[in-house]
Image (cartoon, rainbow, N blue to C red):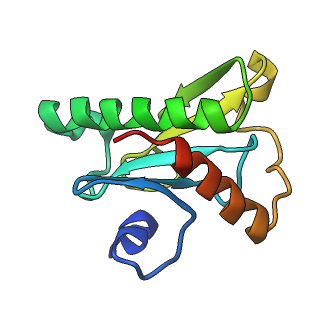
Amino acid sequence: MASIFTRIVNGEIPCYKIAETTQFLAFLDVTPRTKGHTLCIPKQEIDYLFDMPDELLGELMIFSKKVAKALQQAVPCKKVGVAVVGLEVPHTHIHLMPMQSMADFGFGHPPVNTSGEELKSLASNIASFYQP
């Protein structure tokens, strides 16, 4: 059975898209821990980050870097935190989370209450800063 992220890639489930290439997709997390919490994924369904071929892993990191730079321009923050947890969805994904302090970076926090319209507007704003 396809992961939820594969279903997003295939257009079966909508997302708040920020950037897309032939190999990767970046979109807002619908249960964000911070404003702008973004997920970067390979379109190919690979469960575990360290099972990715080296070249694809490197390219995913470069794609994520470009998304993080756009995110930092759109959402004022000291840094964009990066996490790879990999237990909640069996599809490699990188979390990018704008943060002002370490306290902002945590999966134990309740999700930030954000409407669909706010997510749509935020995704568009971040996308406007994305440089392929």
Q: Relative to 14, is 107 on the left or the right?
A: right
Name which residue lies at 18% across and 39% down: 56
Name which residue lies at 52% across and 76% down: 14
**Image height check: is 116 above or below 119?**
below
Residue 81 appears at what percent x and percent y? Answer: 60, 25
User: Relative to the observer, which residue lies in front, 10 or 84?
Assistant: 10
Residue 100 appears at what percent x and percent y? Answer: 78, 20
**Image height check: is 120 above or below 72?**
below
Name which residue lies at 83% across and 47% down: 110
User: Relative to the observer, which residue lies in front, 54 or 129?
Assistant: 129
**Image height check: is 12 above or below 75?**
below
Name which residue lies at 30% across and 38% down: 60
Residue 62 appears at what percent x and percent y? Answer: 32, 30
* Quadrant where the C terminus is found in the figure: top left
Residue 119 appears at what percent x and percent y? Answer: 71, 61
Q: Relative to 132, is 96 on the left or the right?
A: right
Indicate the quadrant where residue 28 lies.
Answer: bottom right
